[in-house]
C-alpha cells in the first residue's frame, strides 16, 4: 500500500514506522530538525510495545513532492490543519483517502472543506507518544490503536483495506461502529488530560492524585461530556465516570502532547481542546467554566514560549 504520513510526530511517526516495517511504501512528511534527522539516520521507535529502527526512510518537507498515495495518515497539530490539507489537494484529486487522527473534534470537517468530504475518513488515535529527540519517537504505555470508519459508519473497501494493512503491521486497529461517539469519548478524556498536565507542566499523577486538583480534572471531564450530550454525539451522563476510570488507569508519568509542547516552548493546542469546548458550550447553552479557566491560564503560551 502507498502511504503518506502527514505529520511525523508521536502519532504519525509511530504508526507510519510500523506500517513501513511491514512492507508498505511509506513516505513521511516532516520538518525542521526531525526532518533532517530522519534524512540522515532514519527513524527509531523507543517503545514499550517493542523497539524498532528503520535505518532509511522516505521523507520529504512538502507533500506536493509525493507523486501518489492510496492512504494519507493525517496527524499534524491542529494549528497546521488548513495548510497541510491544501498541500494534499493534488494527492486527494488523484484518489488518495485522508484518514485523520488529530486531537481535535472537527478535523474531518476542516480537511473536507479543502479537499472534498468524500476524500476524508474520520479516526481516533489512542497512543501515548511524542518526539523524544529528532528522529526518535518515544512511546509509553501498553496501547497503540487506530479506530476509524466512514462518517456514516458504513463498511467500505478503503476502510477495510487500511484496516488490513494496520493489522498486518502488528498494531491494533478497529473499524468503529459509531465513529462520532468514539471521537467524543477520546475528546472528553484528552481535553481534560491535556489541560491539567499542561497546567502542571508534568505528569497526570500530579493533578490526578491531589484531592483539590482532582476536583478540577473531574469538572473538566463532566463539562466535556455535558457538551457532547447537548450535541447528541452519543455520549451519556455515565460516560463521565467511565472516562475518570480510564484516566485513573493511565501511567503515573503520562503527559499529554500539549504538556510536552508547553515544556518545550512550542505552540499548544489549547484553542482546539478547551477552547473548542468553551465555544461549543456557548452554542449549546452548557456552562464550561473550568475549560474557560484553562484557556485563560494557558493563553500566554498558546503561540509558544512568551517573548
Image (cartoon, rainbow, N blue to C red):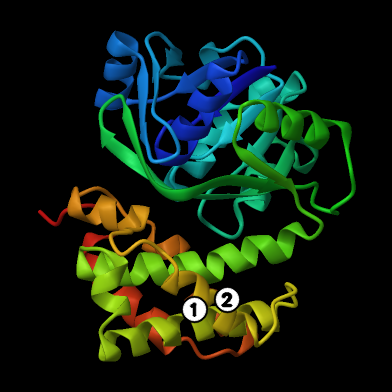
Residue 203 screen position, x and y as percent: 26, 63
Tag 1, which secondary structure?
Answer: helix
- 242 or 100, which is in the foreground? 242
- 59 or 61, which is in the foreground? 59
Q: From this viewpoint, which residue is outermost toward the left? A: 307
For the residues bearing labels 2 and 1, Cβ distance under 8 angstroms? no
Density class for disc 2 (Cα within 10 Å; few <14, some 14-19, many ≥20) is: some
Tag 2, which secondary structure?
Answer: helix
Instruction: Decide which of tag 2 and tag 1 comes sooner along the chain.
Output: 1
Q: Can residue 298 be seen from the camera position used here?
A: no
Tell me: 254 left or right of 1. Answer: left
Q: Who's the residue at 43% across and 45% down the image?
A: 77
**How far, Cα to Cα, is label 2 from label 1?**
22 Å
What residue would you read off at disc 2?
280
Residue 47 screen position, x and y as percent: 38, 37
Q: Who's the residue at 72% across and 40% down the image?
A: 120
Tell me: 184 left or right of 141. Answer: right
Mark number, residue 244? 1
Amino acid at each position: 500500500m502507498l502511504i503518506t504520513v502527514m505529520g511525523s510526530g508521536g502519532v504519525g511517526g509511530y504508526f507510519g514506522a510500523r506500517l513501513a516495517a511491514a512492507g508498505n511504501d511509506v513516505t513521511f512528511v516532516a520538518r525542521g530538525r526531525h526532518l533532517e534527522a530522519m534524512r540522515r539516520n532514519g527513524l527509531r521507535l523507543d517503545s514499550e510495545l517493542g523497539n524498532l529502527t528503520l535505518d532509511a526512510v522516505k521523507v520529504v518537507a512538502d507533500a506536493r513532492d509525493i507523486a501518489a498515495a492510496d492512504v494519507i495518515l493525517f496527524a499534524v497539530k491542529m494549528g497546521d490543519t488548513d495548510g497541510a490539507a491544501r498541500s494534499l489537494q493534488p494527492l486527494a484529486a488523484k484518489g488518495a483517502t485522508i484518514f485523520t487522527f488529530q486531537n481535535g473534534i472537527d478535523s474531518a470537517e476542516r480537511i473536507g472543506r479543502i479537499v472534498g468530504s468524500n476524500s476524508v475518513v474520520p479516526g481516533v488515535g489512542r497512543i501515548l507518544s511524542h518526539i523524544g529527540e529528532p528522529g526518535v519517537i518515544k512511546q509509553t504505555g501498553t496501547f497503540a490503536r487506530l479506530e476509524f470508519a466512514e462518517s456514516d459508519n458504513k463498511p467500505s473497501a478503503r476502510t477495510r483495506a487500511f484496516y488490513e494493512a494496520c493489522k498486518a503491521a502488528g498494531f491494533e486497529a478497529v473499524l468503529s461502529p459509531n465513529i462520532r461517539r468514539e471521537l467524543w469519548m477520546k475528546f472528553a478524556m484528552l481535553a481534560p488530560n491535556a489541560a491539567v498536565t499542561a497546567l502542571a507542566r508534568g505528569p497526570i499523577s500530579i493533578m490526578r492524585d491531589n484531592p483539590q486538583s482532582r476536583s478540577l480534572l473531574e469538572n473538566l471531564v463532566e463539562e466535556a461530556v455535558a457538551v457532547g450530550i447537548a450535541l447528541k454525539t452519543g455520549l451519556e451522563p455515565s460516560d463521565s465516570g467511565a472516562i475518570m476510570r480510564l484516566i485513573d488507569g493511565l501511567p503515573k508519568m503520562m503527559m499529554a502532547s500539549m504538556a510536552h509542547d508547553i515544556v518545550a516552548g512550542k505552540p499548544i493546542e489549547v484553542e482546539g481542546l478547551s477552547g473548542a469546548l468553551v465555544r461549543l458550550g456557548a452554542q449549546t447553552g452548557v456552562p464550561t467554566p473550568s475549560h474557560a479557566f484553562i484557556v485563560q491560564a494557558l493563553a500566554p503560551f498558546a503561540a509558544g514560549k512568551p517573548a
